[in-house]
Image (cartoon, rainbow, N blue to C red):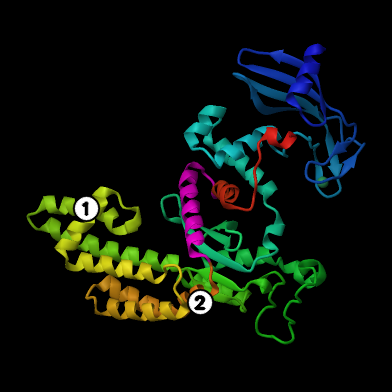
Amino acid sequence: MRVCAAFCRLLQLEGVWVRSVVFEDDRVIVAVALRRRRLVCAHCAFSTRHRENEQRHESVWRHLDLGVWHLEICATLRRLWCPEHGVHVEGVPFARHGARCTRDFDDLVAWLATKADKTTICRLLRIDWQTVGRIIQRVGDEQLDDSRLDELFEIGIDEIAWRGGHHYLTLVTDHRAGKVIWGAVGKSKQTADAFFADLDPPGLAESDPDQAGAGVIAPTAPDTEPDGPAVGPRATKLTAISLDMGPGYAASARQHAPQAVICIDPYHVVQLANRALDEVRRAYWNELRDTDEPDAAKRFKDARWALLKNPDDHTTTQAATLRKLRRAGGGVWRAYTLKEALRAVFARGLTLADVTELIDRFCARAARSRLRPFVRLGQTIVKHAAGILAAIGTGINQARVEALNNKARLITRRAYGFHSARAALALIHLTCGPITLSLPHEQTA
Ligand SMILES: [Zn+2]
């Protein structure tokens, strides 16, 4: 009896009392019973005194370790009938529905997943990575609040490679908050369409406009615009949407938020320049390899990062390599200076007029460069010049966009071990999204 009281205090599990404590070889098993008599639906607030049948379910949850001991909570649960969710096993206050771990354990895993690498988490908590994936999906689903889509003005839609580059995730970023607020598998127009459908669920806007947009901005009246679909109340608030240079997202943005200015992220422009530079470098390297200078070819291969990294981030060796490349001159050096010139176009503190002038000058230089990848890049930039200038005009903080993109990419690489894209998205949401995770002891404090 005294042991039970001690464990009741120790575990701090909501809504239960401890019936027995058993020590086994490697674990402590604590049997608990729910304090409440009423059965509560696992999905909603519905509760009833009525049991659906006499069936009983022995359930087990992993709880926070007790020293070196595994700790398991077990309870016998009943079945109920909810008018909305049908017949199922009753919910418990200390664990999420369908979980094999307590809420505290889930929360610890989710917090760790945003801070530590796979090996650390699996070894520390003695669980496999797929379990981590399931837990963060559960926590992510619960924490991701629809209200995060309420006050969006400037957003970015961007793709990110997932698992070796042939699968993609689309991420939507709130530029003002600097958070990733939506994600899905794919990178097509349909993927972006799915975002706009979540932003303004189709049924909601038609049945009750007051409820959908709190009556702030009325959706475009259908009779004034018979050709296009009405713009949803939350989509009408969007003033700018930044994109890459692909056609899919742009078509979706024009359709669902025609009032928003479409901007091309300078980040993507510089990325294209990096790709063009890498093409020039590789062509030259292949040329070298075909001559009788294998050493030169090898030296040159090492130059890749010296060329692609920003000069501010160079190591001493990379800086020395770059000096050698400059002395050698030629196409690779010309390509490098072009890339750096383009990067400089998007430096902070330049006015729109400056940038317009610099882009013109860059495109002229690229056209004369005799480097085919850069001639093509120049043409692409001319084609998207309006969007690029719009990005400068709207003043979306590029440094922040780039930092968030890089963070999301890093997290995605860590998520490669998950089998499901949903787990990867959950990790991105927990790490880069509008979610604040707390540890079990911080919640009780
Ligand atoms: Zn229910």
Name the residue type under label 2. Ala
Q: Which residues are magenta?
A: 397-421
Name the residue type under label 1. Ala
Position of residue 26 measured from the top left corner of the image (x, y, whole percent): 60, 16
Is 408 within the magenta? yes
Labels 2, 1: front one: 1
Q: Is residue 63 left or right of residue 292?
A: right
Q: Quadrant of residue 93?
A: top right
Q: Is residue 305 left or right of residue 445?
A: left
Q: Is residue 119 left or right of residue 113?
A: left
Determine the residue positioned at 61% across, 12% down: 25
**Towards the viewer: 71 or 166:** 71
Q: Secondary structure at mark 2?
A: helix
Position of residue 403 measured from the top left corner of the image (x, y, whole percent): 48, 56
Q: Which residue is mark 1?
A: 320
Determine the residue positioned at 60% across, 76% down: 260
What secondary structure prevails in the magenta region? helix
| The C terminus: image quadrant | top right
**Towards the viewer: 329 or 277:** 329
Determine the residue positioned at 74% across, 77% down: 219
Q: Which residue is mark 2?
A: 390
